[in-house]
Image (cartoon, coloured by chain):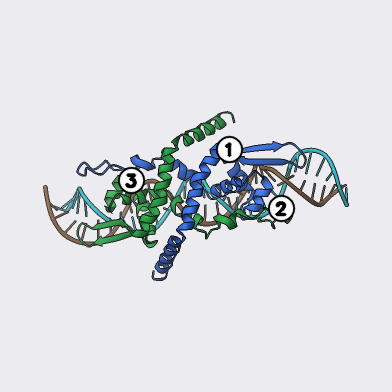
Chain colours: A blue, B green, C brown, D cyan
Amino acid sequence: MADHPHPSDPQETSVDEAVFHERYPSRRLLDLIASRWTPIVLFCLASGTHHYGQMQRRIPGISKKMLSQTLRRLETDGLVHREVYRVVPPKTEYELTELGWRLHEPVRFLCRWAAENAEIFDRIERNRTVASVSE
Amino acid sequence: MADHPHPSDPQETSVDEAVFHERYPSRRLLDLIASRWTPIVLFCLASGTHHYGQMQRRIPGISKKMLSQTLRRLETDGLVHREVYRVVPPKTEYELTELGWRLHEPVRFLCRWAAENAEIFDRIERNRTVASVSE
DNA sequence: CTTTCAGGTTACCTCAGGGTGACTACTACC
DNA sequence: GGTAGTAGTCACCCTGAGGTAACCTGAAAG
């Protein structure tokens, strides 16, 4: 599948070597923010410490399962701190760690860029619908 | 699933309304760059016009199917221009459109940020392996 | 006795993204 | 007649992300 590099083409160094190998930071960053709920949860916590139920209310459409799953992943990654209070009824608090705050930065950039360039996405959508009509 | 907003909590406006609704630019941008091969192909074409086979050689691990599928999606979205030369053997050229170039911008930012903050991902990986060992 | 509340877990199902391998077309070259 | 080279498509399968619904805990309140 991965061909031998073409000896006859001098400028043909692989893209992957440069930036997108699985273990390169760019790929890792993409993997982190690509999952559906991660950036949303990150954003939610960026506005302050939250309880579980509070987050579920603030993020419409998220299921309990996905909320805990996402939080657990972020916790083991060290991006979110989870503080459990052994009271009845239970109480748990989530907040971003320093690492979490740093990751919030590129996500915030993406959102701002997307908002400022919103018209790009309208153009893309138009292209897409034109294509599907004349197909 | 999505609860009624809690009337007793004044600051509890939904995160989704703010930035991550399906139709909001930030979500659209994420959807675009989240798929495995899209940013790679974008990056590859950012270094100049390419032929199909040239790209397959420069992007190790990509299958013919995913390469054409990705290129087709980018084409119908208007991010990539495809020029077919009806010669034998066949020849096709791909290049970024103006729209494609604009989308290359945030992707490039992500890569640069990731490279500059590479140590974050090492820390995350360490956290992850520690967690899996003591589990 | 059973319902409520917060904060979950578990089992089960679906669907899309992605991978593999075979096959196509057309001509030139050996 | 066979094979190579380019640019694909097609049919099939597999995996993992994500969704749904039921269940659990433990004390307190009705």
The kind of residue tagged 2 is Asp
As helix, strand or loop, the secondary structure at mark 2 comes to loop
Give the percent coordinates (x, y) of residue D17.
53, 48
Label 2 marks which chain's residue? B
Task: Report the disc number at residue A97.
Answer: 1
Give the percent coordinates (x, y) of residue C15.
52, 57
Label total for image: 3
Q: Which label lies toward us, 1 or 3?
A: 1
Whole-angstrom CA distance, mark 2 to mark 3, is: 51 Å
Image quarter of the C terminus of chain B = top right
Whole-angstrom CA distance, mark 1 to mark 2, is: 25 Å
- Tags 1 and 3 in contact by the CB under 8 Å rule? no
Q: Residue at x 58, y 56 (%)?
A: B18
Horizontal side of B1 relative to B116 (left or right) equals right
Give the percent coordinates (x, y) of residue C6.
72, 46
**A86 shown above or below A30:** above
The kind of residue tagged 1 is Thr
Horizontal side of A1 relative to C6 (left or right) equals left
Label 3 marks which chain's residue? B
As helix, strand or loop, the secondary structure at mark 3 comes to loop
Which residue lies under the disc numbered 3?
A: B59
Q: Residue at x 63, y 51 (%)?
A: A63
- Residue furthest to the bottom in view is A134
Task: Report the disc number at residue A30.
Answer: none
**C15 shown above or below B110:** below
Which residue lies under the disc numbered 2?
A: B9
Depth order, front residue of C27/B24: B24
The kind of residue tagged 3 is Ile
